[in-house]
């Protein structure tokens, strides 16, 4: 199984990555691709932190950094190019009205993706 975990360095993205580390997978340890999409070099430090979190759980992953204006589309394009089986990403909690945050990346990925998407909700503390 090949997983693509999208991260932007936020708490919700880190929670999604932690969730992947605890998935009960029957096929053993999956191939994990960790992706960040940004407009600047800030994505490099985000990837380093994500890889450190994987290592803390005894996992390894390949780091991918893409530049793109449309983050959701770039995540989906990368998933298709890399032939992944599942995209995993976090989401911000919805406001009291229940409406998605403006330009929700997780909603965009779920709508655009031809492969399954696991959206990991960050627990409210």
Image (spheres, rainbow, N blue to C red):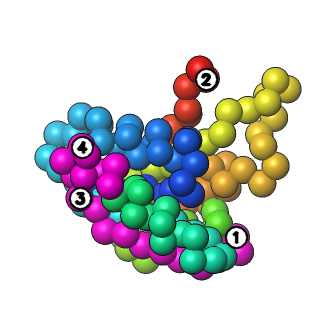
Residue 39 x/y as whole percent? 66, 76
Q: Which structural element holds mark 2?
A: loop
Identify which residue, 112 or 25, lies in the foreground.
25
- The residue lying furthest to the top in this view is 125
Chain-order first, disc 1 or disc 3: 3
Q: Is residue 29 visible?
A: yes
Residue drawn at x 48%, y 66% as measured from the top left: 45
Q: Which residues are magenta?
A: 52-70
Element type where label 3 sits in the image: loop
Q: In this figure, which residue is indicated by the disc labeled 2?
A: 124
Give me the C-alpha separation between circle 2 and circle 4: 23 Å
Q: Is residue 39 left or right of residue 11?
A: right
Q: Nearer the viewer, residue 83 or 49?
A: 49
Name which of mark 1 and mark 2 comes first in the sequence: 1
The answer to which quarter of the image holds residue 74 is bottom right
* Disc 4: which residue: 57
Q: Residue furthest right?
A: 97
Label 3 and label 2: CA atoms lie apart by 28 Å
Q: Is residue 63 magenta?
A: yes
Q: Nearer the viewer, mark 1 or mark 2?
A: 2
Question: Is disc 4 placed on a helix, strand or loop?
Answer: loop
For the question of whether residue 114 can be seen, the reply is: no
Sort mark 2 into few (<14), some (14-19) or many (20+) by Cα contacts within 10 Å.
few
How many numbered marks does the figure carry? 4
Could you tell me residue 55's position as x and y percent? 25, 52
Asked if the residue under mark 2 is in contact with the one under mark 1, i.e. CB atoms within 8 Å, the reply is no
Q: Is residue 6 above or below residue 24?
A: below
Instruction: Find disc 1 in the rendering and name its residue.
Output: 70
Asked whether the residues under the numbered discs 3 and 2 touch, taking CB atoms below 8 Å apart as contact, a structural biologist would say no
Image location of residue 38, percent across then percent down: 62, 71
Q: Which mark is residue 60?
A: 3
């Amino acid at each position: 199984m090949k997983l693509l975990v999208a991260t932007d360095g936020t708490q919700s993205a880190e929670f999604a990555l932690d969730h992947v580390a605890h998935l009960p997978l029957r096929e053993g340890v999956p191939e994990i691709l960790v992706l960040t999409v940004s407009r600047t070099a800030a994505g490099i430090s985000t990837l380093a932190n994500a890889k450190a979190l994987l290592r803390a759980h005894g996992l390894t992953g390949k780091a991918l950094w893409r530049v793109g204006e449309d983050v959701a589309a770039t995540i989906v394009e990368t998933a298709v190019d890399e032939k992944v089986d599942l995209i995993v990403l976090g989401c911000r909690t919805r406001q009291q009205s229940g409406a998605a945050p403006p330009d929700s990346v997780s909603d965009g990925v779920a709508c655009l993706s031809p492969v399954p998407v696991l959206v990991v909700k960050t627990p409210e503390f």
